[in-house]
Image: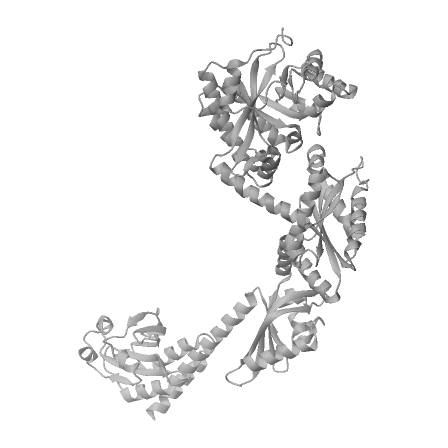
Amino acid sequence: MVIDENVVSVVSRLSRRRGGNLLDNITSALAEVVDADHTFIARINANRTLATTEAYFQKGKRADNFSYDLEHTPCAIVTDNRVCCHNGNVQACFPDDQMLIDMRINSYVGTPLHDSHGNVFGIIVALYEGKIDNEEAVCSLFTLFSGLIAGDIERREKQQSLNLSQAIISEMEEAVVITNDQYEIVSCNKAFTDLTGYTAEEAQGQKTNLLKSGQQDDNFYQRFWSAINEHGHWEGEIYNRKKSGELYPEYMRVQRITEPVSNNIFYLAIHKDITDLNQAREEAFFNKNFDNLTHLPNRQLFLDRLDQLIKQENRSHHRCAVMLIDLDGYQGINSIQGHNTGNQLLQLLARRLQNQYRSTDLIGHLGSDEFVLALSGLDDNLGAQPLAEELLELLRQPFTEFDDPITISGTIGISLYPEDCTNAEQLLAKADQAMQHAKSKGKDRYEFFTSHIQQANTQRLKLKKQLAEALDQRELEAAFQPIICARTGQITKLEALARWNSPDGLVSPAEFVPIAEDFGLCHLLGNLILQQSCTMLETLNSQGHQLSISVNRSIAEFKELNHDISSWLEIIEHARIDNEQISFEITESLLASEQDRLREALHQLKNANCPILLDDFGTGYSSLSYLHSFPIDFLKIDRSFVNNMADSIEARSLIKSIIAMSQALGIKTVAEGIENKRQLAILSTLGCDYYQGFYFSKPLFANELIEYLNSYSPDPTIFS
């Protein structure tokens, strides 16, 4: 009867306290009914070493929750799934339980709380400062209400977990959809509505095929459901359709889920819009495979496509021709008219080529002024020749899109499949060899690859290797050609010229200098000749010969060194000579390239007191503006004009104009290539400042030069 009355009493109190926290209400009601000084419900940690109260009443009032260690306490017994009751003298039984001492507890009742799996996860405890009136009634009441309390705690935790899950899903950046086993949408988050345009109300109850785009066929969906049925999940890229009808790519993950209570099947789908990712992929693919300026395939993509074309031509028993184009004079256009004009020209040419050729033909831009074609479907080799001639004519057509129409030409190298080779990379390489061979013969022409070209290139590679070794071993030697002052007849200058006597014999500069330029060896060659020139000057100075030496520097050197010529000045500074004794000789064609950086480099030399000589003036890029813009001290009249002036009024007039222009600008002139007295006589009447040529001396090595200088005296019939 006491138990029944207590139960009624607890239930009555709970009915009066509807709302609020159920744990607090139960704890409060139990505390009143059992008349305990302290009553609490506590959770036990996984290790059963710590208890934390979730509802605590002291003297009938709600008190702050707390945590305490279970070791040496009666609560530790309760966690072992036993009811623990001590009616009086509890401190004697648990002398190390400080909490019992601090609270002045004399009696204790504790009952375990079990989860749905029968495991102890918490306790109900009543503490008394005195004796318990009816300990059996208290234990029974706690045991009776433990199920209700445990159930409430579990429901509350599950609800908290569910709320947390819903909050996480709601805040996820990815679109989340949950469907039932009929594929009807039962839940979706805000990201889903933002992505698809469907509100939650519009989506719920609809089947997921409301997003179907039609871009995937039945085979795709068969594989999709087969993966889910066999493995319980699927993920991959798919196209879906928004409410607006817009298609969009997404990465979707689908997971089959079984609800544990009802065993009902649900499907969780997570959608991530990959429009930006696909765009980034496309941009990365474009940047990797296409030229940004012309939007034509670059070298790698062209070779990949050429490889596919070769396989296709092999199956159809046709031939194809690879034509590598080098634009003639493009660098001059770039330098004179500016990079914007040069870039626009490349874009217009790319468009012209695309309009001219079939979609089955390949077009590529390999960089700068090089384009490449692969023309397919040829029945025989003869078919390539008229195509090459048509291509030359196409290149010659003026580009009228500019205010002043621009006309260019091209030099073309051609290789043939399958005659020359069956490999894409080798076909392009052999077209390049043929193009280089064509350039060596002039411009605006084409050449087919031949075995002779192959042999010549093999010889070039052999010579390149030998030259690199010779430079490393310092086998090359400077020879010095005297330059005569026209006024006094005295030798005042020398030009340093590279000579190479290899183990196989003397190699002409006409052979090894282009090799050095093509293979990046020019700066090594130039620095070697500069070092030898400085050494020669030290010797000449010690013997009383006050001369200067001009050292040739190639356009290739400026490019190799990125226009940083500080190493040249360092070589001079380490020699026991004056800076003005070394002058640098550059060709006129150099002035047409990268003018700002070249001007800066030449001024750096000029500021170091090194004179500048301009060679080959009038042969290609003549411009009076160059002489104004660059710090030129000496201008060398090209030997071709000197050779012709005896028989050509035009050549004499041109030389006269060059000399007059130079005098007006304060620039001295040097005529090179003088071979006879008649040429010398003409030049003396035109006012040339210096003479150079075989009439006076061939280039001399160091010992020969010393002997020549010691024995030289001006010819009195010429110099008086």
Up-down relation of residue 233 to residue 515 (above or below) = below
Residue 564 image offset from top left, x and y in percent:
54, 33
In the image, is 318 to the left or to the right of 665? Answer: right
Up-down relation of residue 183 to residue 435 (above or below) = below
Q: Residue at x 76, y 45 (%)?
A: 348
Protein image colouring: one colour
Q: Nearer the viewer, residue 194 or 373?
A: 373
Residue 384 image offset from top left, x and y in percent:
77, 53
Q: Quadrant of residue 82?
A: bottom left
Residue 492 image offset from top left, x and y in percent:
56, 15
Q: Nearer the viewer, residue 50 or 512?
A: 512
In the image, is 429 to the left or to the right of 256? Answer: right
Q: Nearer the viewer, residue 194 or 535?
A: 535
Count of numbered tags: 0
Residue 551 image offset from top left, x and y in percent:
56, 26
Q: Residue at x 74, y 57 (%)?
A: 320
Whether residue 146 appears in this view of the structure is: yes
